[in-house]
Amino acid sequence: MPQQPSIPKGTRDFGPLEMVKRNYIFDTIKSVFKLYGFQPIETPATENLSTLMGKYGEEGDKLLFKILNSGDYLQHVDGQLLADKDSVKVTTKIAEKGLRYDLTVPFARFVVQHRNELQFPFKRYQVQPVWRADKPQKGRYREFYQCDVDVVGSDSLLNEVELIQIVNDVYKRLGIRVVLKINNRKILAGIAQVIGQPDKITDITVAIDKLEKIGLDNVNEELLSKGLPQSAVDQLQPILKLSGNNNEKLEQIAQVLATSEVGLKGVEELKTVFDWLEPLGLQTPVELDLTLARGLNYYTGAIFEVKALDVQIGSITGGGRYDDLTGIFGMPGVSGVGISFGADRIYDVLEQLDLYPKSASQSTKVLFVNFGLTEQKWCMPVIAKLRAEGIGCEIYPEPAKMKKQMSYANARQMPFVVMVGEEEMQQGKLTLKNMETGEQQSLSADELVAVLK
């Protein structure tokens, strides 16, 4: 027997019903992006590894999918390198390209490459798949879609406020209850300063970003393993356990950071954001979380993370400000801020909570039953008329038994069926059946359009 075909772990096939639901998510998110003036772009699935490497930290670099060079990729590799089994050095010789890890770094490359064609501040959105060589598990895939929205070329904190509004609007439309956690990397840098470990900022942020996953004891162990002295780890404890509302936390951390200029700058930025959010009356709660670090090296200011309140799953949206991401590509001093919606996790949340509207699973609104060639010919102009009015419809391709055609309509979740027999043709009418209630109506073609619209 031939081997059963399969797909790589961490990837998925999507059938028609799943795609209709996914497109509902994409369309909802895009509609909000457009309301705030963002424009669409796309970038290639593959980027040069020189573009990707070193932008996500050591752990991120390990998760990059590398693509072997075309042809005899071992031709120019020194034999001693192969004998030494130094996979890192060998990889640099045999792979020049990789699959993109996220949409932000390719976006930075895009901005630099097309700088003379863009109007700044440049507001873009991008909905495309990304790839990470991660261990597949529930809610974590190796191939998944991101829905990104970014502003570059503006330092204004108004951008952060609008991104929070976008989060609120998207999840309000999707019907998902969420909480948005916010922090500032300047505050984290200030904490590293006041505990006397400014050079360990990356190790500190990577470790405390895992607090919710692995717990305080394991975070402390990781900090010690990275070379932080016990005294510095002890100083971190009250900071990691801060409580109270947003203003109370900011007041407490401001006292801790009294000697850190950069830390106090972060506190001031968050105060401004909270002040501007207050009169907006958002449905989404926004909470200051000083353990939020987001383990990507390029963040320099506000950082965001959004979690669903009614489902146990990781972050479903995240992002932050990066002051000089384009600098690594030769265009320094361009600040940006953005967020990314994880469409695959949002899909899982909507599925678990059964929040998809019925219309999201209906690609066809009405099926015309096929009773034969004469009836089929009579129906075709009516079907064309409905489609011209934007009503999705189809006719069963052959005059099969009525039970088979009705089963097809049920399986496709079509809400209506139209039947046209000899009597209907003589009267110039059509019989419309509501598949949910069983109710039937005799209608002209114009009346049918009005009812279905």
Image: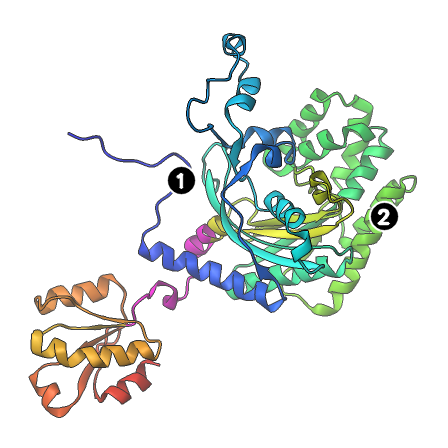
Q: In this view, does 211 lie above or below 179?
A: above
Residue 394 shows in this picture? yes
Q: Is residue 354 visible?
A: no
Q: Which residue is drawn at 8% across and 74% down?
A: 373
- Label annotation for residue 59: none
Label 1 amino acid?
Answer: Thr
* Mark 1 crowd level (few <14, some 14–19, many ≥20, 10 Å Cα): some
Give the percent coordinates (x, y) of residue 167.
Answer: 61, 59
Q: Mark 1 points at which residue?
A: 11
Q: Which amino acid does label 2 sit on?
A: Lys
Range covered by the magenta-colored residues: 347-365
How packed mark 2 is, by other alpha carbons closer than 10 Å (few <14, some 14-19, many 20 or more), is: some
Asked whether 234 or 396 is in front, the reply is 396
Q: Position of residue 172 (x, y in %)?
A: 55, 65
- Specify whether 345 is left or right of 61: left
Question: Quadrant where the C terminus lies?
Answer: bottom left
**Secondary element at tag 1:** loop
Disc 1 and disc 2: Cα gap in Å?
42 Å
The residue singled out by tag 2 in the image is 265
The one of 67 and 271 positioned closer to us in this rendering:
67
Q: Residue at 80% across / 43% down in the picture?
A: 187
